[in-house]
Amino acid sequence: MSYLVPCIYMPESNTLCSHPPNMDISSFSFLSPEDFCSISTNPWFQDLDNGFNKRRKKEDDSKGGFGNGSFSEGGLKKSGYGDILASLLLLEEEAKQEEAEWMSESQQEKAVFESNHKRKVQAMNEFYDQLQQHYSETVKPPWKSVSAVAATVATTSGNDTTTKAEVAVAGGQQRRLWVKDRSKDWWDRCNHQDFPEEEFRKAFRMSKSTFGLICRELEPVVMKKNTMLRDAIPVRQRVAVCIWRLATGEPLRLVSKRFGLGISTCHKLVLEVCSAINNVLMPKFLQWPDEKKMKEVNEEFELISGVPNIGGSLYTTHVPIIAPKVNVAAYFNRKHTERNQKPSYSITVQGVVDQKGIFTDVCIGWPGSMPDDQVLEKSALFQRGLKDVWIVGNSGYPLMDWVLVPYTHQNLTWAQHGFNEKMGAVQNVAKEAFARLKGRWSCLQRRTEVKLQELPMVLGACCVLHNICEMNNEEMDPELQFELFDDEKIAENNLRSSNAVLARDNIAHNLLHHGLRGTSLL
Protein backbone atom coordinates (compact mmCIF):
# COMPACT_ATOMS: atom_id res chain seq x y z
CA MET A 1 0.00 0.00 0.00
CA SER A 2 1.30 3.46 -0.91
CA TYR A 3 0.50 6.68 0.83
CA LEU A 4 0.14 10.10 -0.87
CA VAL A 5 2.36 12.68 0.77
CA PRO A 6 1.37 16.30 0.03
CA CYS A 7 4.08 18.17 -1.86
CA ILE A 8 4.68 21.92 -1.88
CA TYR A 9 6.53 23.92 -4.49
CA MET A 10 9.55 25.88 -3.19
CA PRO A 11 10.24 28.99 -5.34
CA GLU A 12 13.65 29.64 -3.79
CA SER A 13 15.08 26.30 -4.93
CA ASN A 14 12.81 25.73 -7.95
CA THR A 15 12.04 22.23 -6.60
CA LEU A 16 9.25 20.22 -5.03
CA CYS A 17 9.59 18.98 -1.49
CA SER A 18 7.37 16.76 0.60
CA HIS A 19 6.96 19.39 3.25
CA PRO A 20 8.34 22.86 3.86
CA PRO A 21 11.14 23.42 6.33
CA ASN A 22 10.19 23.62 9.97
CA MET A 23 6.62 22.41 9.30
CA ASP A 24 5.04 19.24 10.62
CA ILE A 25 3.50 17.07 7.90
CA SER A 26 0.63 16.15 10.19
CA SER A 27 -0.67 19.66 9.98
CA PHE A 28 -1.92 19.06 6.41
CA SER A 29 -5.57 18.17 5.99
CA PHE A 30 -7.63 16.69 3.17
CA LEU A 31 -9.44 19.06 0.79
CA SER A 32 -13.17 19.57 1.18
CA PRO A 33 -15.69 19.70 -1.75
CA GLU A 34 -15.92 23.50 -1.33
CA ASP A 35 -12.14 23.75 -1.84
CA PHE A 36 -12.43 21.83 -5.11
CA CYS A 37 -15.17 24.23 -6.35
CA SER A 38 -13.09 27.30 -5.55
CA ILE A 39 -10.12 25.83 -7.44
CA SER A 40 -12.18 25.16 -10.59
CA THR A 41 -13.49 28.77 -10.66
CA ASN A 42 -10.07 30.36 -10.10
CA PRO A 43 -9.07 32.53 -13.15
CA TRP A 44 -5.50 31.28 -13.10
CA PHE A 45 -6.66 27.65 -13.42
CA GLN A 46 -9.14 28.64 -16.19
CA ASP A 47 -6.42 30.34 -18.29
CA LEU A 48 -4.18 27.32 -17.77
CA ASP A 49 -6.96 24.99 -18.93
CA ASN A 50 -7.78 27.07 -22.05
CA GLY A 51 -4.11 27.16 -23.15
CA PHE A 52 -3.84 23.39 -22.78
CA ASN A 53 -6.97 22.82 -24.90
CA LYS A 54 -5.68 25.09 -27.74
CA ARG A 55 -2.35 23.26 -27.97
CA ARG A 56 -4.15 19.89 -27.98
CA LYS A 57 -6.47 21.01 -30.84
CA LYS A 58 -3.55 22.09 -33.03
CA GLU A 59 -1.82 18.75 -32.52
CA ASP A 60 -4.98 16.81 -33.44
CA ASP A 61 -5.59 18.88 -36.60
CA SER A 62 -2.02 18.45 -37.77
CA LYS A 63 -2.34 14.62 -37.40
CA GLY A 64 -5.77 14.42 -39.01
CA GLY A 65 -7.14 13.52 -35.61
CA PHE A 66 -10.13 14.90 -33.82
CA GLY A 67 -11.29 18.25 -32.69
CA ASN A 68 -14.25 19.61 -30.83
CA GLY A 69 -14.75 16.20 -29.26
CA SER A 70 -15.63 14.32 -32.55
CA PHE A 71 -13.71 11.91 -34.82
CA SER A 72 -13.15 12.59 -38.51
CA GLU A 73 -13.27 9.89 -41.13
CA GLY A 74 -9.93 10.71 -42.63
CA GLY A 75 -8.29 10.80 -39.27
CA LEU A 76 -9.64 7.38 -38.39
CA LYS A 77 -8.30 5.92 -41.64
CA LYS A 78 -4.89 7.52 -41.20
CA SER A 79 -4.56 6.48 -37.61
CA GLY A 80 -5.80 2.89 -38.28
CA TYR A 81 -8.73 3.11 -35.89
CA GLY A 82 -11.10 1.71 -38.53
CA ASP A 83 -9.40 -1.71 -38.54
CA ILE A 84 -9.56 -1.82 -34.75
CA LEU A 85 -13.27 -1.08 -34.73
CA ALA A 86 -13.94 -3.77 -37.32
CA SER A 87 -12.06 -6.31 -35.24
CA LEU A 88 -14.05 -5.37 -32.15
CA LEU A 89 -17.35 -5.81 -34.01
CA LEU A 90 -16.25 -9.23 -35.27
CA LEU A 91 -15.31 -10.35 -31.77
CA GLU A 92 -18.65 -9.20 -30.45
CA GLU A 93 -20.49 -11.27 -33.07
CA GLU A 94 -18.46 -14.37 -32.22
CA ALA A 95 -19.21 -13.93 -28.51
CA LYS A 96 -22.92 -13.74 -29.21
CA GLN A 97 -22.79 -16.94 -31.26
CA GLU A 98 -20.91 -18.80 -28.51
CA GLU A 99 -23.43 -17.64 -25.90
CA ALA A 100 -26.31 -18.87 -28.06
CA GLU A 101 -24.65 -22.29 -28.52
CA TRP A 102 -24.00 -22.60 -24.74
CA MET A 103 -27.65 -21.81 -23.96
CA SER A 104 -28.80 -24.45 -26.41
CA GLU A 105 -26.52 -27.12 -24.88
CA SER A 106 -27.66 -26.21 -21.35
CA GLN A 107 -31.30 -26.63 -22.32
CA GLN A 108 -30.57 -30.08 -23.76
CA GLU A 109 -28.68 -31.21 -20.63
CA LYS A 110 -31.48 -29.94 -18.41
CA ALA A 111 -34.06 -31.88 -20.42
CA VAL A 112 -31.98 -35.11 -20.14
CA PHE A 113 -31.53 -34.64 -16.36
CA GLU A 114 -35.25 -34.08 -15.77
CA SER A 115 -36.10 -37.14 -17.84
CA ASN A 116 -33.72 -39.35 -15.82
CA HIS A 117 -35.04 -37.94 -12.55
CA LYS A 118 -38.64 -38.72 -13.50
CA ARG A 119 -37.73 -42.31 -14.36
CA LYS A 120 -35.94 -42.81 -11.01
CA VAL A 121 -38.83 -41.34 -9.03
CA GLN A 122 -41.28 -43.55 -10.87
CA ALA A 123 -39.17 -46.65 -10.16
CA MET A 124 -38.89 -45.79 -6.45
CA ASN A 125 -42.63 -45.22 -6.18
CA GLU A 126 -43.33 -48.58 -7.80
CA PHE A 127 -40.93 -50.32 -5.36
CA TYR A 128 -42.50 -48.55 -2.36
CA ASP A 129 -45.99 -49.57 -3.50
CA GLN A 130 -44.89 -53.18 -3.77
CA LEU A 131 -43.33 -53.01 -0.30
CA GLN A 132 -46.49 -51.52 1.20
CA GLN A 133 -48.58 -54.20 -0.45
CA HIS A 134 -46.27 -56.89 0.94
CA TYR A 135 -46.60 -55.65 4.52
CA SER A 136 -50.33 -55.11 4.20
CA GLU A 137 -50.68 -58.76 3.22
CA THR A 138 -48.38 -60.13 5.97
CA VAL A 139 -49.51 -57.83 8.83
CA LYS A 140 -53.26 -57.77 8.36
CA PRO A 141 -54.77 -56.67 11.73
CA PRO A 142 -53.66 -53.03 12.24
CA TRP A 143 -54.95 -53.01 15.82
CA LYS A 144 -52.48 -55.61 17.06
CA SER A 145 -49.91 -54.60 19.66
CA VAL A 146 -46.38 -53.76 18.62
CA SER A 147 -45.02 -57.00 20.02
CA ALA A 148 -47.63 -59.04 18.12
CA VAL A 149 -46.89 -57.22 14.87
CA ALA A 150 -43.16 -57.73 15.37
CA ALA A 151 -43.69 -61.44 16.07
CA THR A 152 -45.80 -61.85 12.92
CA VAL A 153 -43.18 -60.19 10.73
CA ALA A 154 -40.41 -62.23 12.35
CA THR A 155 -42.30 -65.45 11.61
CA THR A 156 -42.89 -64.42 8.00
CA SER A 157 -39.32 -63.35 7.34
CA GLY A 158 -37.75 -66.28 9.18
CA ASN A 159 -35.42 -64.02 11.23
CA ASP A 160 -35.00 -65.28 14.80
CA THR A 161 -32.90 -62.45 16.25
CA THR A 162 -34.03 -59.15 14.77
CA THR A 163 -37.58 -58.30 13.73
CA LYS A 164 -38.93 -55.33 11.83
CA ALA A 165 -42.44 -53.92 11.64
CA GLU A 166 -44.25 -50.83 10.42
CA VAL A 167 -46.84 -49.52 12.84
CA ALA A 168 -49.77 -47.42 11.68
CA VAL A 169 -50.18 -44.24 13.71
CA ALA A 170 -52.62 -41.35 13.73
CA GLY A 171 -52.82 -39.39 10.49
CA GLY A 172 -52.01 -42.39 8.32
CA GLN A 173 -48.24 -42.16 8.93
CA GLN A 174 -46.05 -45.24 9.14
CA ARG A 175 -43.37 -45.66 11.83
CA ARG A 176 -40.77 -48.39 11.63
CA LEU A 177 -39.76 -50.35 14.75
CA TRP A 178 -36.83 -52.66 15.26
CA VAL A 179 -37.26 -55.22 18.05
CA LYS A 180 -34.49 -57.41 19.50
CA ASP A 181 -35.72 -60.82 20.64
CA ARG A 182 -34.31 -61.28 24.17
CA SER A 183 -35.38 -63.62 26.90
CA LYS A 184 -36.69 -62.19 30.19
CA ASP A 185 -37.48 -65.54 31.78
CA TRP A 186 -34.99 -65.17 34.64
CA TRP A 187 -36.29 -61.78 35.75
CA ASP A 188 -39.91 -62.85 35.31
CA ARG A 189 -39.30 -65.75 37.68
CA CYS A 190 -37.49 -63.52 40.23
CA ASN A 191 -40.28 -60.96 40.10
CA HIS A 192 -43.00 -63.53 40.68
CA GLN A 193 -44.57 -63.59 44.13
CA ASP A 194 -43.93 -67.34 44.46
CA PHE A 195 -40.17 -66.96 43.93
CA PRO A 196 -38.33 -68.32 47.04
CA GLU A 197 -37.19 -65.69 49.54
CA GLU A 198 -33.76 -67.27 49.97
CA GLU A 199 -33.10 -67.30 46.24
CA PHE A 200 -34.15 -63.66 45.97
CA ARG A 201 -31.89 -62.69 48.89
CA LYS A 202 -28.97 -64.53 47.31
CA ALA A 203 -29.44 -62.71 44.01
CA PHE A 204 -30.08 -59.17 45.34
CA ARG A 205 -28.43 -59.25 48.80
CA MET A 206 -31.70 -58.27 50.48
CA SER A 207 -35.19 -59.53 51.18
CA LYS A 208 -38.22 -58.89 49.03
CA SER A 209 -39.63 -56.44 51.58
CA THR A 210 -36.46 -54.32 51.61
CA PHE A 211 -36.35 -54.40 47.82
CA GLY A 212 -39.97 -53.26 47.71
CA LEU A 213 -39.16 -50.39 50.10
CA ILE A 214 -36.40 -49.15 47.80
CA CYS A 215 -38.68 -49.38 44.75
CA ARG A 216 -41.41 -47.37 46.46
CA GLU A 217 -38.96 -44.67 47.51
CA LEU A 218 -37.46 -44.37 44.01
CA GLU A 219 -40.65 -44.78 41.97
CA PRO A 220 -41.46 -41.04 41.60
CA VAL A 221 -37.96 -40.42 40.18
CA VAL A 222 -37.15 -43.46 38.03
CA MET A 223 -40.59 -44.26 36.61
CA LYS A 224 -40.99 -43.58 32.87
CA LYS A 225 -44.13 -43.30 30.73
CA ASN A 226 -45.11 -45.68 27.94
CA THR A 227 -44.54 -44.52 24.38
CA MET A 228 -46.38 -45.20 21.16
CA LEU A 229 -43.90 -47.88 20.09
CA ARG A 230 -43.15 -49.75 23.31
CA ASP A 231 -43.98 -49.98 26.99
CA ALA A 232 -41.61 -48.40 29.49
CA ILE A 233 -39.37 -50.63 31.62
CA PRO A 234 -41.11 -51.14 34.99
CA VAL A 235 -39.66 -49.55 38.12
CA ARG A 236 -38.94 -52.89 39.80
CA GLN A 237 -36.97 -54.09 36.79
CA ARG A 238 -35.01 -50.81 36.63
CA VAL A 239 -34.05 -51.05 40.29
CA ALA A 240 -33.28 -54.77 39.97
CA VAL A 241 -30.85 -54.15 37.09
CA CYS A 242 -28.90 -51.66 39.21
CA ILE A 243 -28.86 -53.70 42.43
CA TRP A 244 -27.94 -56.97 40.68
CA ARG A 245 -25.10 -55.20 38.88
CA LEU A 246 -23.77 -53.75 42.15
CA ALA A 247 -24.26 -57.01 44.03
CA THR A 248 -22.53 -59.30 41.54
CA GLY A 249 -20.15 -56.94 39.76
CA GLU A 250 -20.82 -58.88 36.56
CA PRO A 251 -20.08 -57.19 33.22
CA LEU A 252 -22.90 -55.47 31.39
CA ARG A 253 -23.18 -58.17 28.74
CA LEU A 254 -24.21 -60.68 31.43
CA VAL A 255 -26.62 -58.16 32.97
CA SER A 256 -28.14 -57.77 29.53
CA LYS A 257 -28.73 -61.52 29.22
CA ARG A 258 -30.24 -61.78 32.70
CA PHE A 259 -32.84 -59.08 32.24
CA GLY A 260 -33.47 -59.29 28.49
CA LEU A 261 -32.35 -55.71 27.83
CA GLY A 262 -29.73 -54.08 25.65
CA ILE A 263 -26.23 -53.52 27.01
CA SER A 264 -26.43 -49.75 26.61
CA THR A 265 -29.87 -49.78 28.23
CA CYS A 266 -28.52 -51.64 31.26
CA HIS A 267 -25.61 -49.22 31.60
CA LYS A 268 -28.01 -46.27 31.45
CA LEU A 269 -30.33 -47.83 34.02
CA VAL A 270 -27.48 -48.44 36.48
CA LEU A 271 -26.38 -44.81 36.34
CA GLU A 272 -29.93 -43.45 36.55
CA VAL A 273 -30.86 -45.57 39.58
CA CYS A 274 -27.54 -44.80 41.34
CA SER A 275 -28.16 -41.11 40.79
CA ALA A 276 -31.68 -41.45 42.21
CA ILE A 277 -30.33 -43.31 45.25
CA ASN A 278 -27.86 -40.50 45.95
CA ASN A 279 -30.45 -37.76 45.48
CA VAL A 280 -33.48 -39.38 47.15
CA LEU A 281 -32.29 -42.04 49.61
CA MET A 282 -28.99 -40.62 50.86
CA PRO A 283 -30.59 -37.67 52.73
CA LYS A 284 -32.89 -40.16 54.49
CA PHE A 285 -30.59 -43.09 55.21
CA LEU A 286 -27.09 -41.59 55.42
CA GLN A 287 -26.86 -38.52 57.66
CA TRP A 288 -24.94 -37.25 60.64
CA PRO A 289 -26.66 -38.09 63.97
CA ASP A 290 -28.71 -35.41 65.66
CA GLU A 291 -28.31 -34.67 69.36
CA LYS A 292 -30.62 -37.46 70.48
CA LYS A 293 -29.10 -40.03 68.17
CA MET A 294 -25.56 -38.95 69.08
CA LYS A 295 -26.30 -39.60 72.75
CA GLU A 296 -27.32 -43.16 71.90
CA VAL A 297 -24.14 -43.62 69.86
CA ASN A 298 -22.00 -42.34 72.76
CA GLU A 299 -23.60 -44.77 75.16
CA GLU A 300 -23.16 -47.76 72.86
CA PHE A 301 -19.50 -47.02 72.18
CA GLU A 302 -18.87 -46.46 75.87
CA LEU A 303 -20.13 -49.99 76.53
CA ILE A 304 -17.63 -51.28 73.98
CA SER A 305 -14.58 -49.26 75.02
CA GLY A 306 -15.25 -47.69 78.38
CA VAL A 307 -14.49 -44.27 76.83
CA PRO A 308 -17.31 -41.69 76.86
CA ASN A 309 -18.25 -39.25 74.10
CA ILE A 310 -17.21 -41.42 71.14
CA GLY A 311 -19.37 -40.40 68.20
CA GLY A 312 -18.10 -42.74 65.50
CA SER A 313 -15.41 -45.02 64.13
CA LEU A 314 -13.38 -43.75 61.18
CA TYR A 315 -11.83 -45.88 58.44
CA THR A 316 -10.59 -45.49 54.86
CA THR A 317 -10.51 -48.24 52.24
CA HIS A 318 -9.49 -48.41 48.59
CA VAL A 319 -11.56 -49.49 45.58
CA PRO A 320 -9.60 -50.82 42.56
CA ILE A 321 -9.99 -49.05 39.22
CA ILE A 322 -8.62 -49.32 35.71
CA ALA A 323 -5.56 -47.14 35.16
CA PRO A 324 -6.90 -43.70 34.17
CA LYS A 325 -5.68 -41.90 31.07
CA VAL A 326 -4.79 -38.72 32.95
CA ASN A 327 -2.98 -38.26 36.29
CA VAL A 328 -2.24 -41.96 36.38
CA ALA A 329 0.51 -41.52 39.01
CA ALA A 330 -1.96 -39.97 41.47
CA TYR A 331 -4.10 -43.13 41.45
CA PHE A 332 -1.20 -45.58 41.76
CA ASN A 333 -1.52 -47.67 44.94
CA ARG A 334 1.88 -48.80 46.12
CA LYS A 335 0.74 -51.23 48.85
CA HIS A 336 -1.82 -52.95 46.63
CA THR A 337 0.84 -53.23 43.89
CA GLU A 338 3.25 -54.94 46.28
CA ARG A 339 0.51 -57.25 47.55
CA ASN A 340 -0.92 -58.17 44.12
CA GLN A 341 2.46 -58.27 42.35
CA LYS A 342 1.08 -56.13 39.52
CA PRO A 343 0.39 -52.40 39.03
CA SER A 344 -2.74 -51.43 40.97
CA TYR A 345 -4.74 -48.22 40.91
CA SER A 346 -7.52 -47.16 43.26
CA ILE A 347 -9.70 -44.43 44.68
CA THR A 348 -10.43 -43.95 48.37
CA VAL A 349 -13.65 -44.31 50.37
CA GLN A 350 -13.54 -42.70 53.82
CA GLY A 351 -16.44 -43.41 56.15
CA VAL A 352 -17.60 -42.88 59.72
CA VAL A 353 -19.92 -45.53 61.19
CA ASP A 354 -21.97 -45.71 64.37
CA GLN A 355 -22.03 -48.60 66.83
CA LYS A 356 -24.19 -50.69 64.44
CA GLY A 357 -21.88 -50.26 61.46
CA ILE A 358 -24.18 -47.78 59.71
CA PHE A 359 -22.44 -45.02 57.77
CA THR A 360 -23.03 -41.51 59.13
CA ASP A 361 -20.50 -39.73 56.88
CA VAL A 362 -18.66 -40.69 53.69
CA CYS A 363 -16.01 -39.06 51.52
CA ILE A 364 -15.49 -40.76 48.15
CA GLY A 365 -13.23 -40.29 45.16
CA TRP A 366 -9.79 -39.04 46.21
CA PRO A 367 -6.83 -40.73 44.41
CA GLY A 368 -5.39 -43.91 45.86
CA SER A 369 -1.88 -42.48 46.38
CA MET A 370 -3.22 -39.94 48.90
CA PRO A 371 -2.59 -40.97 52.55
CA ASP A 372 -5.47 -41.24 55.00
CA ASP A 373 -4.63 -38.06 56.89
CA GLN A 374 -4.75 -35.95 53.71
CA VAL A 375 -8.06 -37.51 52.69
CA LEU A 376 -9.43 -36.56 56.10
CA GLU A 377 -8.23 -32.96 55.74
CA LYS A 378 -10.04 -32.64 52.39
CA SER A 379 -13.31 -34.15 53.59
CA ALA A 380 -16.45 -32.39 54.81
CA LEU A 381 -15.99 -34.15 58.14
CA PHE A 382 -12.84 -32.09 58.77
CA GLN A 383 -14.81 -28.88 58.12
CA ARG A 384 -17.63 -29.90 60.43
CA GLY A 385 -15.81 -28.51 63.47
CA LEU A 386 -16.75 -31.23 65.94
CA LYS A 387 -16.70 -30.41 69.65
CA ASP A 388 -17.22 -32.51 72.76
CA VAL A 389 -17.09 -35.71 70.73
CA TRP A 390 -14.36 -38.17 69.73
CA ILE A 391 -14.02 -39.85 66.35
CA VAL A 392 -11.80 -42.92 66.71
CA GLY A 393 -9.35 -43.64 63.91
CA ASN A 394 -6.38 -45.92 63.32
CA SER A 395 -2.72 -44.98 63.20
CA GLY A 396 -3.12 -43.59 59.70
CA TYR A 397 -4.82 -40.50 61.15
CA PRO A 398 -3.27 -37.78 63.32
CA LEU A 399 -4.22 -37.13 66.93
CA MET A 400 -6.37 -34.00 67.01
CA ASP A 401 -8.83 -32.30 69.35
CA TRP A 402 -11.65 -34.47 68.01
CA VAL A 403 -9.78 -37.46 66.50
CA LEU A 404 -8.60 -40.13 68.93
CA VAL A 405 -5.94 -42.57 67.66
CA PRO A 406 -3.82 -45.29 69.34
CA TYR A 407 -0.23 -44.89 70.49
CA THR A 408 2.28 -45.73 67.77
CA HIS A 409 5.67 -45.48 69.52
CA GLN A 410 7.53 -48.47 70.95
CA ASN A 411 7.86 -49.55 74.59
CA LEU A 412 4.26 -48.80 75.57
CA THR A 413 3.21 -48.61 79.19
CA TRP A 414 0.44 -50.78 80.63
CA ALA A 415 -1.96 -47.86 80.43
CA GLN A 416 -1.05 -47.11 76.79
CA HIS A 417 -1.31 -50.77 75.82
CA GLY A 418 -4.76 -51.05 77.40
CA PHE A 419 -5.85 -47.86 75.66
CA ASN A 420 -4.79 -49.27 72.26
CA GLU A 421 -6.84 -52.41 72.89
CA LYS A 422 -9.96 -50.35 73.60
CA MET A 423 -9.41 -48.20 70.49
CA GLY A 424 -8.90 -51.39 68.48
CA ALA A 425 -12.33 -52.63 69.59
CA VAL A 426 -13.92 -49.38 68.36
CA GLN A 427 -11.94 -49.57 65.10
CA ASN A 428 -13.16 -53.10 64.47
CA VAL A 429 -16.70 -51.74 64.20
CA ALA A 430 -15.67 -49.67 61.17
CA LYS A 431 -13.51 -52.39 59.64
CA GLU A 432 -16.29 -54.95 59.90
CA ALA A 433 -18.74 -52.48 58.37
CA PHE A 434 -16.43 -51.92 55.39
CA ALA A 435 -15.93 -55.67 55.07
CA ARG A 436 -19.70 -56.17 54.89
CA LEU A 437 -19.93 -53.28 52.40
CA LYS A 438 -17.44 -54.90 50.03
CA GLY A 439 -18.77 -58.41 50.65
CA ARG A 440 -22.37 -57.42 49.94
CA TRP A 441 -21.56 -55.33 46.84
CA SER A 442 -19.02 -57.31 44.85
CA CYS A 443 -18.53 -54.49 42.35
CA LEU A 444 -16.20 -52.92 44.95
CA GLN A 445 -13.87 -55.91 44.90
CA ARG A 446 -12.76 -55.74 41.29
CA ARG A 447 -11.97 -53.16 38.65
CA THR A 448 -15.20 -51.91 37.19
CA GLU A 449 -16.26 -50.72 33.74
CA VAL A 450 -17.72 -47.53 35.20
CA LYS A 451 -15.94 -44.34 34.17
CA LEU A 452 -13.81 -42.64 36.80
CA GLN A 453 -15.99 -39.51 36.93
CA GLU A 454 -19.13 -41.64 37.46
CA LEU A 455 -17.62 -44.02 40.00
CA PRO A 456 -18.16 -41.85 43.15
CA MET A 457 -21.89 -41.81 42.42
CA VAL A 458 -21.93 -45.62 42.18
CA LEU A 459 -19.91 -46.01 45.40
CA GLY A 460 -22.22 -43.59 47.20
CA ALA A 461 -25.19 -45.71 46.14
CA CYS A 462 -23.46 -48.80 47.58
CA CYS A 463 -23.02 -47.05 50.94
CA VAL A 464 -26.69 -46.01 51.01
CA LEU A 465 -27.88 -49.52 50.14
CA HIS A 466 -25.56 -50.90 52.83
CA ASN A 467 -27.25 -48.65 55.40
CA ILE A 468 -30.71 -49.74 54.29
CA CYS A 469 -29.75 -53.38 54.64
CA GLU A 470 -28.18 -52.79 58.06
CA MET A 471 -31.21 -50.86 59.32
CA ASN A 472 -33.51 -53.68 58.19
CA ASN A 473 -31.26 -56.34 59.79
CA GLU A 474 -30.49 -58.05 56.49
CA GLU A 475 -28.21 -60.97 57.22
CA MET A 476 -25.30 -61.68 54.92
CA ASP A 477 -24.60 -65.08 53.45
CA PRO A 478 -21.41 -66.50 55.04
CA GLU A 479 -20.10 -67.14 51.54
CA LEU A 480 -20.02 -63.37 50.96
CA GLN A 481 -17.55 -62.65 53.76
CA PHE A 482 -14.73 -60.44 52.50
CA GLU A 483 -11.25 -60.18 53.97
CA LEU A 484 -10.39 -56.51 54.22
CA PHE A 485 -6.80 -55.69 53.37
CA ASP A 486 -5.50 -53.23 55.98
CA ASP A 487 -3.29 -50.75 54.08
CA GLU A 488 -2.99 -48.06 56.73
CA LYS A 489 0.20 -46.06 57.02
CA ILE A 490 1.29 -44.11 60.09
CA ALA A 491 0.74 -40.41 59.53
CA GLU A 492 3.90 -38.33 59.28
CA ASN A 493 2.66 -35.57 61.57
CA ASN A 494 0.57 -37.72 63.87
CA LEU A 495 0.41 -35.29 66.82
CA ARG A 496 -1.53 -32.15 65.90
CA SER A 497 -2.70 -30.92 69.30
CA SER A 498 -1.00 -30.73 72.69
CA ASN A 499 -4.40 -30.69 74.41
CA ALA A 500 -5.31 -33.92 72.61
CA VAL A 501 -2.04 -35.52 73.80
CA LEU A 502 -2.85 -34.64 77.40
CA ALA A 503 -6.46 -35.82 77.03
CA ARG A 504 -5.37 -39.18 75.57
CA ASP A 505 -2.88 -39.74 78.41
CA ASN A 506 -5.57 -39.07 80.99
CA ILE A 507 -8.02 -41.42 79.26
CA ALA A 508 -5.38 -44.17 79.20
CA HIS A 509 -4.57 -43.62 82.87
CA ASN A 510 -8.22 -43.67 83.96
CA LEU A 511 -8.94 -46.78 81.89
CA LEU A 512 -6.26 -48.65 83.82
CA HIS A 513 -6.81 -47.28 87.32
CA HIS A 514 -10.31 -45.79 87.61
CA GLY A 515 -12.37 -47.24 84.80
CA LEU A 516 -12.50 -43.71 83.30
CA ARG A 517 -14.86 -42.42 86.00
CA GLY A 518 -14.55 -38.76 86.87
CA THR A 519 -12.61 -37.71 83.73
CA SER A 520 -12.78 -33.93 83.34
CA LEU A 521 -10.91 -33.45 80.04
CA LEU A 522 -13.96 -33.72 77.78
Image: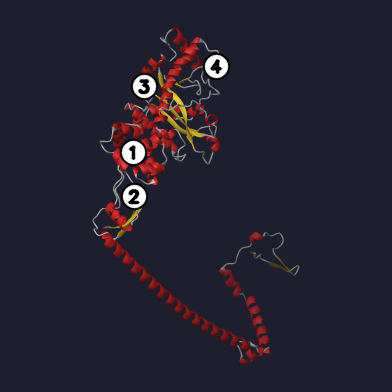
Task: Measure how far apart labels 2 and 1 are at the Cα level.
Answer: 20 Å
Query: For mark 3, what is the residue?
Result: 294
Looking at the rendered image, the disc whose residue lies closer to the viewer, 2 or 1, is 2
Image height of 50 relative to 38, above or below: below
Looking at the rendered image, the disc whose residue lies closer to the viewer, 3 or 2, is 2
Task: Measure how far apart labels 3 and 4 are at the Cα level.
Answer: 32 Å
Task: Measure how far apart labels 2 and 4 are at the Cα level.
Answer: 66 Å
Q: Are marks 2 and 1 in contact (CB under 8 Å)?
A: no
The answer to whether residue 368 of the structure is visible from this angle is: yes
- Dot 1 or dot 3: first in sequence order is 1
Count neighbours of disc 1 (C-alpha within 10 A) and say few if under 14, some if 14 to 19, many if 20 or more: many
Image disc number at residue 181:
2
Furthest residue in direction front, as rendered: 158
- Residues 25 and 212: in front is 212
Query: For mark 4, what is the residue?
Result: 409
Query: For mark 1, what is the residue?
Result: 240
The kind of residue tagged 1 is: Ala
Give the left or right position of residue 281, taking residue 416 as reference. left
The kind of residue tagged 4 is: His
The kind of residue tagged 3 is: Met
**SS under mark 1:** helix
The kind of residue tagged 2 is: Asp
What is the x, y in percent for residue 11?
73, 69
Q: Are marks 2 and 4 in contact (CB under 8 Å)?
A: no
- Dot 2 or dot 4: first in sequence order is 2
- Dot 2 or dot 1: first in sequence order is 2
Count neighbours of disc 4 (C-alpha within 10 A) and say few if under 14, some if 14 to 19, many if 20 or more: few
Task: Measure how far apart labels 3 and 2 are at the Cα level.
Answer: 54 Å
Give the left or right position of residue 100, taking residue 142 as reference. right
